[in-house]
Image: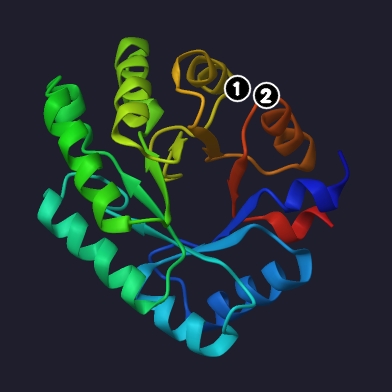
Amino acid sequence: MNKTEILSHVDHTQLKAYATWEDIIRLCQEAIELKTASVCVPPCYISKIRETFQDQVRICTVVGFPLGYSVTEAKVAEVKKALQDGADEIDMVVNICDVKNHDFDAVESEIRSIREAAGTHILKVIIETCYLTEEEKIELCRIITEAGADYIKTSTGFGTAGATLEDIRLFRAHIGPDVKMKAAGGIRTAEAMEEYLEAGCDRIGCSSASSLV
């Protein structure tokens, strides 16, 4: 797999709390040059990116990020505002508190609400694997499939650990045929990206894509 093919699966990411507009401009320019799948950015920059770069980049943004425990109504409002501002894709953080309490009905209800708010736009669900047991991960595979999300995503990159190939293999065994996988957190080399893509991932979240070429 060559670097161009790898980069076409990358969500070029800048989600630091102190990201400046200059950081975002550089990210978008790199994404255009490298032909990455999207840029993944803080919601506050969506409208400015759309105004500046028009349709040159696909804009992915985050909802309920990075901790996931904001209420469903707030997450739905975030989604609606993000789409109004020009976002193309939504990466939401699951309510990890509900997961740890095994209130899986609440988890599924929230994802369904956000799926409805996102409409036909791509919806990725971040489950933050570093905090979960294998049984919880398997249950989330089922819920995400049944709730109609497009992707299951490993990590925010702000937790205690990021993606592992073991988790990707677990997802692959338990998600439905229409659900894709995104790995994020700690993936920094072309070799690692290729490993994740060969394991079945469709997207890679990475903040260092420009260093690969």
Query: Label for residue 109?
Result: none
Q: Seen in the image, is 6 located left or right of residue 141?
A: right
User: Residue 189 sits in which quadrant?
Assistant: top right
Residue at the disc numbered 2: 199
Q: Residue at x 54, y 38 (%)?
A: 182
Disc 2 on helix, strand or loop?
loop
**Amino acid residing under circle 2:** Ala
Percent position of residue 16, x then y: 44, 62
**Amino acid residing under circle 1:** Leu
Task: Say which of 149 and 129 sits in front.
Answer: 149
Q: Seen in the image, is 208 located left or right of residue 6?
A: left
Q: Residue at x 32, y 57 (%)?
A: 118
Quarter of the image containing the C terminus? bottom right
Residue at the disc numbered 1: 165
Whether residue 58 is visible:
yes
Q: Residue at x 33, y 49 (%)?
A: 92
Percent position of residue 85, x then y: 36, 78
Q: Residue at x 35, y 75 (%)?
A: 44
Q: Label 1 neighbourhood size at 10 Å, few (<14), some (14-19), many (20+)?
A: some
Q: Seen in the image, is 17 located left or right of residue 105?
A: right
Task: Say which of 72 and 14 sits in front.
Answer: 72
Count of labels in the image: 2
Task: Say which of 164 and 111 sits in front.
Answer: 111
Q: On screen, 114 above or below 126?
A: below
Percent position of residue 72, x then y: 14, 49
